[in-house]
Image: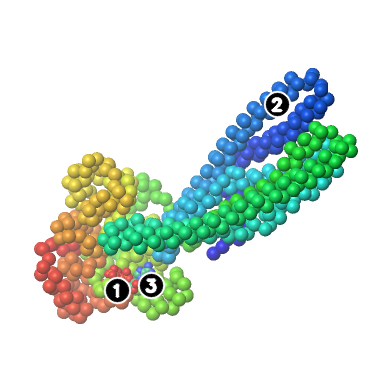
Amino acid sequence: MEVAKGTIFRRLISYTKRYRLLYVGLLISMLVGIGLELSVAQYLSRMTNVAASGDQSQWSILIVAGATILVLTVLFQYGDAFLKGIVSSRIRRDLRDDTMDVVLRLTQSEFDRSHSGELTARLTNDNAAIGDLFGNTLLQLIRNPLLAIAAFIFLLQIYWPLAIICFLIGPTTLLIGILFGKPIMNNSIQQQQRQERQLTFLQDILNTSLLFKAFGLESKLLHKFRSLSSEVTETERKGAHLQAAIAGTGSGIGLTSFIVAFVFGAYFVTQGKMGVGGLLAFIQLLNHLTWPFTNLAGTWGAAQQSFGAANRIFELIDREVEQRTFVHVDPSSERKAVFEKLEVENVQFDYSHSFDEDALQSSVLNPAVNNISFTIIKGQRVGVVGPSGSGKTSLFKLLLGLYRVQSGVIKLNGASQETMELSLLRSYYSLVPQESRLYTGTIRDNLLYGKADASEEEMLDALQAANALDFVMRLPDGLDSELAEHGGSLSGGQRQRIAIARAMLRDAPILLLDEATSALDSESERDIVQALNRLSEGKTTITIAHRLYMVRDADVIIVMDQGQIQAIGKHEELLVECDLYRRMFDAQMYAQDHQPAITAIV
Ligand SMILES: Nc1ncnc2c1ncn2[C@@H]1O[C@H](COP(=O)(O)OP(=O)(O)OP(=O)(O)O)[C@@H](O)[C@H]1O
């Protein structure tokens, strides 16, 4: 969705407000710059007239004046460039922070719809493409007309007819802006889109190195990458073409105006209407009269590029974020969730309600969770089983408040989840997913995500309970060992144990285990099952299990099929009363006979 250009401009300007002082500095430096430009013309005129008159008495004054202009120009250029750089990078940082703030609060549906590469592109490429809009471009848009007016007033005093002729030539360069503004903005948007596609593809590849090597996909992937690269290059080529057209047309108009003014000027000199010094000042200032307009076109082009990038950033910033308060909870003031009862009453949920019309039509027929009801009380160990796609994970997502239920209600301790602050709601739960991913950083950093103020002792205890202490201590830097991306330097089982230690530190009353051992070999599985049993002591646990033996000792097992609950009961009861459960059990008998003796999780 495109954001209106006026709105983009207003929103961009709002980012400059907190840097008012810097902008005052930049405006002063802009006025000083204009003054210096005019003084150079004045200086040249004086110098020429003195040379022509042969009056040597003014040489020393002119040398001092020349040196002063030189020093001031150097100081001004330094200060000006520095201030522009600072203000540009600070505002881009603010924009980046705001974008990230929104990304973290996007609804789960938005995450489902977006590719991480797209979000990364908005935070990186698009942010960079804003360029020095705030430092240079915006100020140029003010400076150039101001400089033109100042030059015009100055020229009027030398010889007004020539000044008028020059002033009429200058604005013709505005045509450039009118001709090229829109194509440049469109080109910028296209460039960013294509770069985003390339980045998205790149991320997919980099996250699956094992897979593409195993499948020998290198040359195919390279081929696709090259074609995406060519698309990017093609838009860059068009962009370069547009910029070149601006530069060519601009300098053509500039040169024409120079020649016209020079011819008229020379004529006026021969007529004795003005001196040679005046003509020289004219030539010098003519640059400032026509160049601002020529330059305005280029600046306008740069502004259009920045607006194109800003359009994409604001489109992301305007996406749907989680509405229920997302508060930063200070660890010391964090309320501890005390759990008594979880009630799920006639809950219905269908992913389509946040997607497009087509998806709506198809998915309404198959709600992921269809009118389910059950109650879990404190301390219960609950298993959730069912065929693939039966809605088990969707149920977890609803419990965590990642989506809103379409009908029915989920109550925690009698209060509807809908009315709770998300941060409080989620503090009731600790999730151990199928495959735990760790954050880049140290093991300590990862554990602190479980509890921000955990002591060293607490961390070591958690690692011990998670059967992870031994291997962590064998790492060269122990707790401070750096992990590769997503914890890739550890085995799947080791990652899972760190994740369990993290969940232990979080110490939430309800534990959600989503097939936490499914991706592991039987030896790791045994370690993890032990760790999970320790983690679940004194907690309420809800475990999704494909392998029924993992939940056979559960207090209650919920059997799901096609989003509905088929039966609820204990293992033995379900074997008798629930066909689906019995069939699943029978099908797994063979596999179960070949499993090593493992204590069930719940
Ligand atoms: N993000 C999503 N967007 C749209 N549909 C989804 C999404 N996630 C799951 N579904 C659909 O919802 C239904 C239930 O999926 P869910 O992941 O809850 O099943 P599951 O029982 O956990 O399956 P599995 O055991 O294979 O993990 C499936 O039909 C699935 O295609």
Q: Is residue 515 left or right of residue 549?
A: right
Q: Is mark 3 within 8 Å of ligand 1?
A: no
Q: Position of residue 116 (x, y in %)?
A: 41, 58
Q: Position of residue 477 (x, y in %)?
A: 24, 40
Q: Is residue 350 left or right of residue 551?
A: right
Name the residue type under label 3.
Phe
Marks 2,1: beta carbons within 8 A = no
Of callouts 1 and 3, the N-terminal one:
3
Mark carried by residue 390: 1
- The residue at the point 81 percent across, 21 percent down is 55
Q: Is residue 578 left or right of residue 361?
A: left
Q: Position of residue 155 (x, y in %)?
A: 80, 39
Quickly name the residue at label 3. 349
Name the residue type under label 1.
Ser
Indicate whether 453 appears above or below 527.
Answer: above
- The residue at the point 35 percent across, 73 percent down is 368
Mark 2 vs mark 1, CA separation in Å: 84 Å
Mark 1 neighbour class, 10 Å CA radius: few under 14, some 14 to 19, many 20 or more: many
Mark carried by residue 125: none
Quickly name the residue at label 2. 66
Which quarter of the rendering shows the N terminus?
Answer: bottom right
Residue at disc 2, secondary structure: helix
Name the residue type under label 2.
Gly
Of callouts 3 and 2, the N-terminal one:
2
Q: Quadrant of residue 237?
A: bottom right
Residue at disc 3, secondary structure: strand
Mark 1 vs mark 3, CA separation in Å: 13 Å
Of callouts 2 and 1, the N-terminal one:
2
Q: Is mark 1 within 8 Å of ligand 1?
A: yes
Of badges 1 and 3, nearer the viewer stands 1
Indicate whether 140 appears above or below 550.
Answer: above
